[in-house]
Image: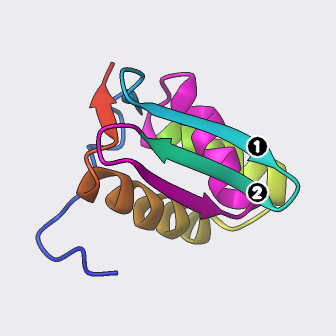
Amino acid sequence: MATSGVTEPPSDERIRLRHDRVRWREEHFGFVLYDGRADSLYEGNHTGCEILRCLEAGASMDDVCAALRARYGVADDTAARDVAEFVRFLVLEDLLAPC
């Protein structure tokens, strides 16, 4: 996925999914997300599901990384990399909004 020129929000900025058009649900494999504006469906794994849970609550990037470290016991750099990659995708698809 090309994300050239797309950056994630600052680590302390609170972000959330665009509730006006984005719906998602947890599934046995992870999650399904629906973008009503683009009529697009996305699927992802359990890590993505954890990230979406945090974003639904209006978390910052730092909060999301802390949740991944606590839930999966991953290193700081691994959590930061996973969150940044997923959030870049959401930014690219215009699925996030500041709180």
Quarter of the image holding residue 69? Answer: bottom right
For label 1, the residue is 26
Counting other residues with Cα less than 10 Å from the Cα at mark 2, is it few (<14), some (14-19), or many (20 or more)?
some
Q: Say whether residue 42 is visible.
A: yes
Q: Amino acid at mark 2?
A: Gly
User: Which residue is tagged 2?
Assistant: 30
Question: How far is the residue under mark 2 from the one under mark 1?
Answer: 6 Å
Identified by mark 1, the residue type is Glu
Q: Nearer the viewer, residue 72 or 43?
A: 43
In percent of the image, x 69 and y 46: which residue is there? Answer: 50
> Which SS class for mark 2?
strand
- Disc marking residue 12: none
Give the side of residue 23 with respect to residue 68, left or right: left
Where disc 1 sits, the SS reads strand
2 and 1 marks in contact (CB < 8 Å): yes
Within 10 Å of disc 1 (Cα), the crowding (few <14, some 14-19, many 20+) is some
**Is residue 98 rendered to the left or right of residue 51?**
left
Q: Residue furthest right?
A: 28
Coordinates of residue 64 in the picture (x, y in percent): 57, 43
Residue 43, position as x, y percentages in the image: 61, 61
Reply above or below: 1 against 46: below
Outermost residue, front direction? 39
**How many numbered discs?**
2
45 in the magenta segment = yes
Picture coordinates of residue 4, whole percent (x, y): 16, 77
Whole-percent x, y for residue 66 in the image: 64, 44
At 17% from the left and 63% from the top, the residue drawn is 6
Q: Residue at x 74, y 66 (%)?
A: 74
- Start and end of the magenta stretch? 36-61
